[in-house]
Image (cartoon, grey):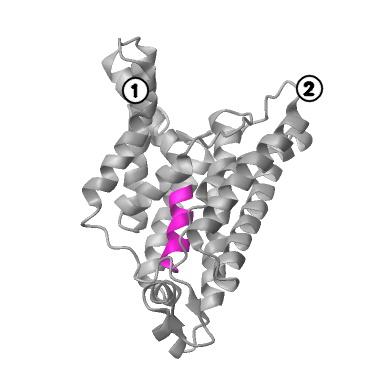
Amino acid sequence: MTIDFFSDYLVASLRLAVPLAFAALGGLYSERSGVLNIALEGMLLTGAFTSAVITFYTNNPWVGVMVALIFGGIVGLIHAFLCVTLYVDQLVSGLAINLVAAGLTSFLGRLVFHSSTQRLVGIEPIIIPGFANLPLLGTLLFQQNIFVYLIFILVILSTYILFNTSFGLTLRAVGEYPKAAETTGISVQRVRYLAVVFGGCLASLGGAYLSLVQVRYFAEGMSAGKGFIAIAALIFGKWHPVGSAFACLLFGATEALQLRIQALGVNVPYQFLVMLPYAIALLALVSKKSKSTPPAALGVPYFQENREFK
């Protein structure tokens, strides 16, 4: 009984960490290029809504995922245009996108789903023969859906790309000292556009996971602050793919724990349990405040005309 409980807890922790990891990885690319991305919450919501709507009408979740990728990229493009081209304050731009996404998805969600019994066709887990029946590891690693396997691949690839390729060096250079990067012929604006748009696509995959795998329907505000927790994971993980992924797993484990404590009927106010993941995120930020160093140009607009920070 104890082994089964522990196994179920680990599986739940991993599954709850997946949308956080996609959002954190999307934020990592954006912020490594120097663009602060508070808009992760809105990108998650956009991905969840668009994938749910398209799946609802086509009955094909893969089409929903593709459309979510496109719209996530569009939201990223809007954020990049506001911050990189128009020099809008990056914090204000991100918050505006979050507010618009929350309002628009709620309004359109009521129009689409108000008279229908919403139960979306989900994405089923992939069972790997020969490994799926292993004790503990079988359920944890070899009976998961494609999003789980994809996030493992993306974390490994991102680590390699960031620290072992010329593109990764370019991205980090733009985020650390864009003036020096531009003197070598690098287009700071182009790199930041690519990073923010790609980050939007990754974050939208986290939203698609929420609606097509985790709950299989769309609900207003279903991201429930996960975009902000992803930002906390990014800071806690020192803007490193592996560190951020482990931070997401920690927050996922915290959320899984509070759900199980509620299910066991422990005499603790449920409001306290609901706020537990956010409290852990806050404590993580406080504990890492003096140790985490963000990219030097993070949040600072780069004015190409006069080649200086303002």
- Name the element at disc 1: helix
Task: Identify the residue under disc 1.
Answer: 272
Q: Is residue 48 magenta?
A: no
Q: In which quarter of the image is the N terminus?
A: top left
Q: Position of residue 134 (x, y in %)?
A: 35, 29
183 vs 86, nearest the viewer? 86
**How many numbered discs?**
2
Name the residue at 34% across, 58% down.
240
Does the segment drawn in magenta span residue 28?
A: yes
Provide residue 118's location: percent of width, then percent of height.
Answer: 70, 24
**Residue at the image position 38 percent from the left and 78 percent from the top:** 177
Q: Do the residues labelled 2 and 1 touch (CB within 8 Å)?
A: no
| Residue type for callout 2 | Ser
Identify the residue shown where x is 24% and y is 51%: 288
Q: Is residue 238 left or right of residue 187?
A: left
Left or right: 72 in relation to 280: right
Tell me the quarter of the picture where residue 168 sits. Answer: bottom left
Residue 183 found in image quarter: bottom left
Q: Position of residue 44 (x, y in %)?
A: 55, 44
Q: How far apart are marks 2 and 1 (CA)?
A: 35 Å
Q: Is residue 228 left or right of residue 100?
A: left
Question: At numbered mark 2, what does the secondary structure look like: helix, strand or loop?
Answer: loop
Magenta residues span 23-33
Which numbered dot is residue 115?
2
From what the image shows, is residue 82 above or below residue 150? below
Q: In this view of the protein, which residue sits in the foreground, 60 or 47?
A: 47
